[in-house]
Image (cartoon, rainbow, N blue to C red):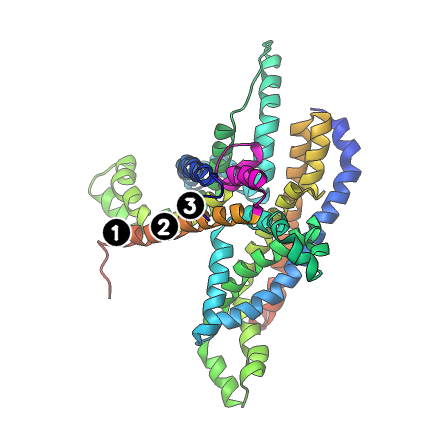
Amino acid sequence: MDFEIIIQSLPRFFHGILITLEITAISLFIGFFLAIVLAVMRVSKNPFIWMPVYGFNFYFRGTPLLVQLFLIYYGSGQFQEFLSQVGLWQFFKEAYFCAVLSLTLNTAAYASEIFRGGIQGVNFGEIEAGRACGMSGVLLYRRIILPSALRIAWPAYTNEVVFLLQASSLVSIITLMDITGVARVIAARSFAFYELFLTAAVIYLILVYGVIFVFKKIEKKINAHLSEANA
Amino acid sequence: MFDIEGYGLLLLEGFKLTIIVGVFAMVISLLIGLVAALCKLSKFKSLKVLAEIYTTVIRGVPELVLILLVYYGGPTVIQMIASYFGKDIYVDVNPFFAGSVTIGFIYGAFATEVYRGAFMAVPKGQMEAARACGMSGLLTFRRIHLPQMWRFAIPGLGNVWMILIKATALISVIQLPELMRNADVAARATRKPFTCFFLASLLYLFLTIVSLAFQQWAEKKADRGVRRA
């Protein structure tokens, strides 16, 4: 095994880690809020509200992320004229924008189904008590339903975050230099394929278990009042 | 719309290969998962640790990196091992083989957890009764434990299949002419990338819908002996 090439490419891998984390974090952040809105719409009783969300979720969960990525990055080229007219082409021609957009929509679809489960899992007594205190609508959601739902959904959401971190490796296919992208480019030049892909795999492994550690810590924090020590 | 200048057939051919690769990979993952789950539940510490390492590592590395690692790195490793034994060979990995085996290997880790849960869900009294009837350990496993485990495993394995079939799109990266790769070829030739990739996505969606229906049917069939309140 050629260790020299691994050590030599570490600075570039470091840059790749930053890109991977950046894309994942931005998509997660926007996707999180989008997912909450979608989840609230999804549990609505009005079919004009829940059905579009159902369709959106079904499409984004039923097709591969790679297709979604290509559909946005390459597919937008088919509408170049229209997109230029409305001033959006400058965004769609950027691989970075398309990568973030597709990852955001994808995670929003998966997370909103997770949050929906959380919302439906909230103890009805809590909602009843909230109503009895005179809360309704947004206030009820903000103070009672969403905090409780998030607590229920957190372990499943942790899984989704890990999936998104790994899925972000696909952005290397549309020329971005994330961890996988760095490994592919250096490997193509140096032919040290398995050294570099193995390095990439180890980096992902560390990141994934780092993320799991952090999210478990948060889980403990948001459930602190339920832990046995306080009971 | 479905013809797309004569490239519609190319998409359908790719669709066929996607299904073949998916089924092949699924069979591999079902077998690996079963073996790994039995290792995790076995009495031997070393087998347990081995299976634990397998699922931990596989679930922490992106599929794409593993596919690239096996396809591009595999030949080098095999050649290195061969030259260690004084043989000079040239290995060329077939994309179909590399892709489906890697995907199967990855989703075997997910299947492992499904099987483990299913094995543990079978009531202990069943196995105790079998032993009391004089069945040996292996016979108990074959007649009582294994057949009853499937009922608990089907929903989980159905989910593994649905993630797996979408993951096969990644094999397009190593030039296997499956649905995604053919859609890419058609998109370049016709200069209608949106139409081609959208059609491809609809074909994947169709596969998901059929799989969901099949899963529901299988669950019903597996539960037919269970009394419902």
- For residue B8, side relative to residue A23 (left or right): left
Of residues A181 and B33, the one nearer the viewer is A181
Mark 1 and mark 2 lie on one chain; the one further toward the N terminus is 2
Report the residue marked by disc 2: B210
Q: Mark 2 is on which residue type?
A: Val
Report the residue marked by disc 1: B221
Mark 3 and mark 2 lie on one chain; the one further toward the N terminus is 3
Q: Do callouts 3 and 2 mark residues in contact (Cβ within 8 Å)?
A: no
Q: Which residues are magenta?
A: B168-193
Q: Mark 3 is on which residue type?
A: Trp
Q: CA distance from mark 1 to mark 2?
A: 16 Å
Kindly identify which chain the residue marked by label 1 belongs to.
Answer: B
Kindly identify which chain the residue marked by label 3 belongs to.
Answer: B
Q: Which mark is residue B49?
A: none
Q: Looking at the picture, how far across and down is residue B9, in whole percent?
A: 43, 38
Mark 1 and mark 3 lie on one chain; the one further toward the N terminus is 3
* Label 3 neighbour load within 10 Å: few <14, some 14-19, many 20+: many
| Residue at the image position 56 percent from the left and 73 percent from the top | A146
Q: Looking at the picture, how far across and down is residue B185, in whole percent?
A: 55, 37
Kindly identify which chain the residue marked by label 2 belongs to.
Answer: B
Pointers 3 and 2 within a single chain: yes
Report the residue marked by disc 3: B161
Marker count (numbered): 3
Residue B199 visible at all: yes
Dot 3 falls on a residue whose secondary structure is helix
Q: Eyeballing the image, is A196 above or below A129?
A: above
| Residue at the image position 63 percent from the left and 44 percent from the top | A169
